[in-house]
Every structure is written in structure tokens, then in C-alpha cells.
Image: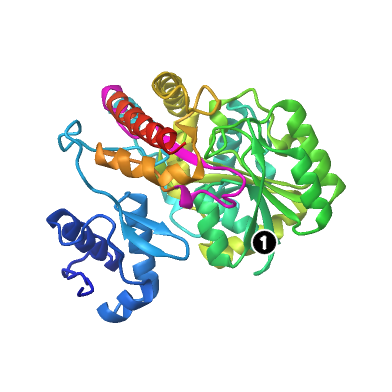
Amino acid sequence: MQKWYPEIQPGKAPAFLRLLEAIEKDISSGSLASGTKLPTQRDLAERLGLSVGTVIKAYAEGQRRSLLIGHVGRGTFVAEQRQNSQSRGRVVDLSLNIPGPSILPKVLAGSTWTFPNEISDYVGYLSQSGVLDHRIQFARLLRETGFDTSPDNLVITNGALHGISLTLSAICQPGDKVFVEATTYHGMKSYAHFARLDLVGLPMDEEGLVPDAFEKAAASGAARVLFTMPTVQSSTAAIMGPARRQEIVRIARKHDILIIEDDAYGFLDEASVPLASLAPERTFYVNTLSKCLAPGLRLGMLIVPEQYIPRIHQAMRATCWMASPISSMIASQWIENGTAAKVRQSLIQEAKKRVKLASQILRPYVRAGHPTSFHVWLDLPSGSVEQVSARALQRGVITTPTSALLVDPTLISGLRISIGVPDRLEDLEWALRQLAAALEVSHEADMSII
């Protein structure tokens, strides 16, 4: 059989997207049938005159869109693409973990807010930490969401991932190991791969990271850094109770482990005390405005232990010098005039409705997580995850490839469902019911094997 190769059309889009468009076109036309094995990344790169990295990105995005399925040691294959008659061409994406519909455009449309006269103060090169007045407002936002902190150790970043990368570059060297939960933030996985860091997945339960496992790993000396999301964990939506948090801090102090705490979803649970409050001397606290206000601002907050501030400033100068002062000015104005609080409360109420709906429709499969979240975790046997994803796609529902999140697949198996993307609750309900049907078919198939 003649090996398939795509025809990439010229255009302004990045090469990996044009390659993916060619793959998608051939799948739609029937030139690439379900189950077809694609050429290796190196083979396709050489054939098309592309870099291997471009093909890797195209295949990864194809998996994210559930067009392709990757099998470790076997290669990349075309996922089943049959359209179930019930979907009738309708497609809902439950793969992107973003907040629900924001009221920000509506709030701004009804306001008279304009750029302040002092905008000229923010068009030059400024401090690596950010403008003090802006840091004061950012610290105010954190206090409003449950973390009483000072602007003194606060560094404004270009989003949460930037804060994570600054921290890792300041405290790690290539080849170092970093402890993480068995399934973690995909951005952390991507940066660790880029920075040549090895992630060590640790067991989880309904409260997230398991202390006994952390203690054992820390005692081994395998790593001196822990990356964790104790509040509404990015895959499972687990939340650490107060006693669990105290225990994690005790272990970190005992074994001299530095902590990177990603609190991107902390605004959804204002009662939780951040690890940074319990162990400020060893915790790098990361937060973002992407989840609670607006992703387009590209702003985050990094609270740094005092002794590490010079190294963080050095890392900032080496990457982007500073976060955008103009974006910071806009965000500060929205925090000060109450716009941020209105948007945040609206998102919290929307998250509660969506979790309730998902828990009702997917009840037998949903792992108990936080009742206010924009994602839920479905506990599934490892052998059925890809089957469920493929069957969901047949019904018009796109899910997150589990490989994007898992660090150690021997410790946990399942599927994250992001429920914030559809603007309308009716679309979300339809997608969840299609997913429930795909789960039921998979369950019946498993039972028939038994």
C-alpha cells in the first residue's frame, strides 16, 4: 500500500497548523481512514521539508482535537471519525480548560472607563517586579480571593506559566527532577520538557497529593522542588483540606523542599489557605488573571520568598524584561473600580451551575471534586480512555487527550472534561449527554468482555 503524505497549502498560518489542516482535509475526504498509521514525525518532516518540531506540534494538536491518537511505542493513528446520527454535524469542544462565559464585555459596554491621563508613565522600561501602584492593586485582588499578602514580594508576570517558568529557571538546572501530582497542568509538562527537567509523578486521592507518598519521595532525595495545585487541581478539581496542607508543609520543611504553588483556580474557593501563607519562606505562589478576569490581559502574579527575588528579577530580565505595564494599568483600574469583582462573582456562580449539571449527567463516573469548578475528572480504566474519547468524537464532542495531562499513568487513569467552553448551558448539556452515551457504550463493551 502506498504511504500517505499530505499536500500543504501555502498561507500565512504557522506551518504546523497548515499541516494539520491538510491532515484534517484528508480525513474528511476519506483519503485517511480511521485507524490509518501516519508516517513517523521524522519521516514526514524529511518528506515535506519541515522541522521535526513542526510535525510534533501538528500531531500533538491533532491529538488535542481528537483527530489523531498516539500510542507510545506504536506511532500515531487516525482516530475513528464516524459521525453518529445523533450529532448531525454539531460539535462541542470540551477540551479547553477555560472559564465560562464572561460578563466583562457587557460590564465594559455599560461603563465610561477610559485610559487614564498617566498612561504616558507606562510606555517605557520599568521595574522587573512591576509598577508599585499596580502591585498594590494585585495584592488587593489576592486578599479579596483569600490570600492576605503584601505587594513587597509580588512580581507581575505574563500569566501563570510565565511565573512558573521564571521560578523553575531560578531554582533548577537542566536534568533536575521536580515532584508533581500524577496528573498535572499541561503547561508545566510542556515547560519541563523544554527546560529538560524530569517530572516525578506522585500518587493522588480525593484531596490531591498524598502526604505519605510525598514523604517517601522527599526522603529519597530524588528532587528538591514540588509543583502542586492544592486548590481545584487542574485535572481532578481536588482540593486539599486544612490538615493535608499542614502536613505537606511539614514534610517540605523537614526535607528542605521548595514549593511552587499554582493557585490559578484559588478564586473559586476563597476559604482555602494557600501553602504560601503556611510556608512563605519556601513557597513560590503563582496566580493569574486569565481564569478570574480576562486571558487577553496575559498577566499573572508571583509571590517570591525574599531571598530569591534577585534571581527572579534576573530571570525576568533574561526573558522579557517586564510584564506589560499598560496591561497592568488596565487590570489595576478594573480591580480598583470593582469590575474584576463583578466578573469573578459571575464566573463563580456559572461554575457552580456547570459542575452541578455535569455531576447529574455523568454521576456514575465523576470523581468527587470541588463543587465550583470549570472541569471535572472521570475515573476510567486505562484501556477505555481512548475508546471513550473516540466514541465521544463520533457524537460531536471533543475531549482533552489524557496524555497531555498525565505524568505517571500507572498512578491514575481517567479523562478531564472542561465544562467552561460552551457559551450556552444548552450546548453543554447536549455535549454531556452525548458523552454519557459514549461512556455507556464503553461500559457495555467492557462488561461483554468480562
Considering depth in this image, is 349 or 111 the residue closer to the camera?
Answer: 349
Tag 1: amino acid? Ala
Residue 2, relative to residue 251: is it above or below?
below
Question: Is label 1 in a helix, a strand or a loop?
Answer: helix
Q: Please tell me which residue is depicted at 65% across the width and 69% down the height of the picture.
A: 174
Is 370 part of what is drawn in magenta?
no
> Where does the magenta region start and end?
402-428
The residue under label 1 is 170
Is 412 part of what is drawn in magenta?
yes
Residue 342 picture quarter? top left
Q: Is residue 420 visible?
A: no
- Estimate the x, y position of residue 35 in percent, counting from the top left: 29, 57
Considering depth in this image, is 171 or 66 the residue closer to the camera?
Answer: 66
Q: Please tell me which residue is depicted at 62% across the width and 64% down the height of the picture.
A: 197
Q: In the image, is 101 to the left or to the right of 288?
A: left
- Estimate the x, y position of residue 246 in percent, counting from the top left: 79, 33
Residue 368, relative to residue 114: is it above or below?
above
Binning the other alpha carbons within 10 Å of mark 1 as few (below 14), some (14 to 19) or many (20 upward) gives some
Q: Is residue 327 visible?
A: yes
Q: In the image, is 12 to the left or to the right of 260?
A: left
- Estimate the x, y position of residue 324 in percent, counting from the top left: 46, 52
Residue 213, relative to residue 364: is it above or below?
below
Residue sitting at the far right: 254
